[in-house]
Image (cartoon, rainbow, N blue to C red):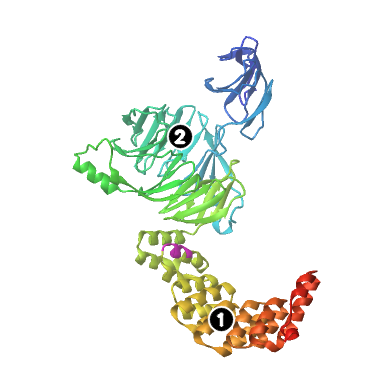
Amino acid sequence: TGGDKPYLVSGGDDGLVKIWDYQTKACVQTLEGHAHNVSCVAFLPDRPLILSGSEDGTVNLWHSNTYRLESTLSYGLDRCWSVAYLKGSNNIALGYDNGTVVVMLGKDQPVASIDGSGKLILARHNEIITQNIRNVDATTMVDGERLQLPSKELGSCEVYPQKLEHSPNGRFVAVCGDGEFIIYTALAWRNKSYGQADELVWDAGGGEFATRVGGHDIRVFNKAFNERQALRPAYAVEGLYGGALIALRGADFVAFHDWETLQLVRRIDVVAEQIYWSDDGTLVSIASDTSFFLLKFNREALDAALEASAGQLDTEGVEEAFELTHEIAEKVVTGRWVGDCFIYTNASNRLNYCVGAEVSTLAHLDRTLFILGYLPKDNRVYLVDKAGSVVSYLLLLSVLEYKTAVVRGDMETAEKLLPRVPESEHNKIARFLDSQGMKELALQLATDEDYRCELAIALGQLEMAASIARKSPSELKWRQLSSLATAKGDFDLAKECMTECNDFSGLVTLFMSKGDRAGLRDLGDKAAAAGKMNVAFLCYFSTAQTRECLELLIRTARYAEAAFFARTYMPSEVPRAVELWKADLRKRNAIKVSDAIASPDAHA
């Protein structure tokens, strides 16, 4: 059946699909497109589509409002006998002679938009509902928990919404679908303008918008909704993006055009999937399939080029208009700019934000979420899932403003903003400053003792690092500090560090360099007790403790070495060492070798 319409769909052996009004019993529409018997048909409940499968092996998708053929599916599995859908999902199943195919139609991203005040407009089929996030107290929100938002019906839409977007000032909402666009007032949902368009995008705040019809027809409308100018690109335009400039996406490039003159500003060779502009129009993010690029837009360079060329730009555009600042190897699912900070969700279901080249993870998501926007008064970023449920995560505006000032090099402003940053965020700020090469400032803000010690060592501040290490000791800290103390010639501190982390090898080198016989003797005993026999032997040998050297060799069952050592340094101990060596060989069944060994005292 046809949902809210009193319609039935049928297929026949004549290859036709017919739509019937079951109240009047009249045929409303006949659809032609199959070469053989139509064996199965279905109205999709969640999308304006009619499916028809045929014995010719094809499945046609028809628009249930315009009755236009949208697409034909063919998988080479002979005759199609059945189609099925799962209500509430985008999946359909197709049954053939030689197999079954499950297809996902469209995308999971909901059709929704939020304005700067927190008013959310969401499309559920043709029905439009509104929710106000500001009705919920931000202090009671828990990160990742669904917000209980009361819904209110705003009206309905004459087209099936495929994209819905607020104008930059929040006064209007543009809806695209079925090859048409309609612009409504955001409060009363009154129709203000309509026309043909596959896509509609807004400018950066002047109230103008642009539409794309097909692949070669771009039209710009003024704030009075009247067409102002048209552009007919020579290439096929696959996507249209708004912002400070109009962006046209080709097969393997993006062309940026000026809103006022529609002249080419810059062509960038990249296979783009989405483009995001910052609110002030100075930064842009171009997202591709594997990474995203952060660029700086130079409006002054564009204006200077227009003035120098008497308003007529070169056909190649203005090379200086864009400057690539960073490339980050992550796939962006959805993104938004907040000042100079780019917030995005990635393909790994993580919510990240990027300031400069520094990427921080705000949350690991348990499902795919799509960014709606950021409300500075709440200090929260809002996201929505495919079912239309809204969740939020805390992201302090003071932190973003501070990081932005640092990236811009405005340390005076950053210093003024710092008191607004909670102390709980200081350690994260310190790590950000460290990444920007500001280790001294990072050390002042860091609260984690391990990290402060690491920074102090990196800055060569021995006393501070030693003080931290003594308060919260760890082997790693002492080892790092011992290396630095040795390099700086502070051997007393180096000795303390090596002793604390049981760096016997380092202590051997240190004591032997200083000629510290007492230290070597003491270290030999400690090394032997710790099982570091090579270090212990070296200490004993360096201090002429031959008895301890021999006993150490015997204790570690190194009888051959003990025998030769005794022959050289302690002849009186040779018989004992040789007997121990021979007894060990007998235990290993090396009797012939044992018998071949002769003790010097037996042949004196």
Disc 1 marks a residue whose amino acid type is Val
Residue occupying image coordinates x 59% and y 41%: 386
Point out residue 175 in the picture as x, y percentages from the top left corner: 47, 34
Quarter holding the C terminus is bottom right
- Residue 503 appears in the figure: no
Vertical placement of residue 325 versus 90, above or below:
below
Vertical placement of residue 449 versus 286, above or below:
below
Quarter holding the N terminus is top right
Chain-order first, disc 1 or disc 2? 2
Point out residue 29 in the picture as x, y percentages from the top left corner: 57, 15
- Secondary structure, mark 2, is loop
Residue 600's tag is: none
Segment colored magenta: 431-436
The answer to whether 243 appears left or right of 123 in the picture is: left
The residue identified by callout 2 is 190
Vertical placement of residue 600 versus 282, above or below:
below
Please rate how many residues cluster around mark 1, counting C-alpha atoms within 10 Å: few if below 14, some from 14 to 19, many from 20: many
Q: Quadrant of residue 192?
A: top left
Front residue of this view, candidates 377 and 416: 416
Point out residue 190 in the picture as x, y percentages from the top left corner: 46, 34
Residue 508's tag is: 1
Residue occupying image coordinates x 19% and y 43%: 308
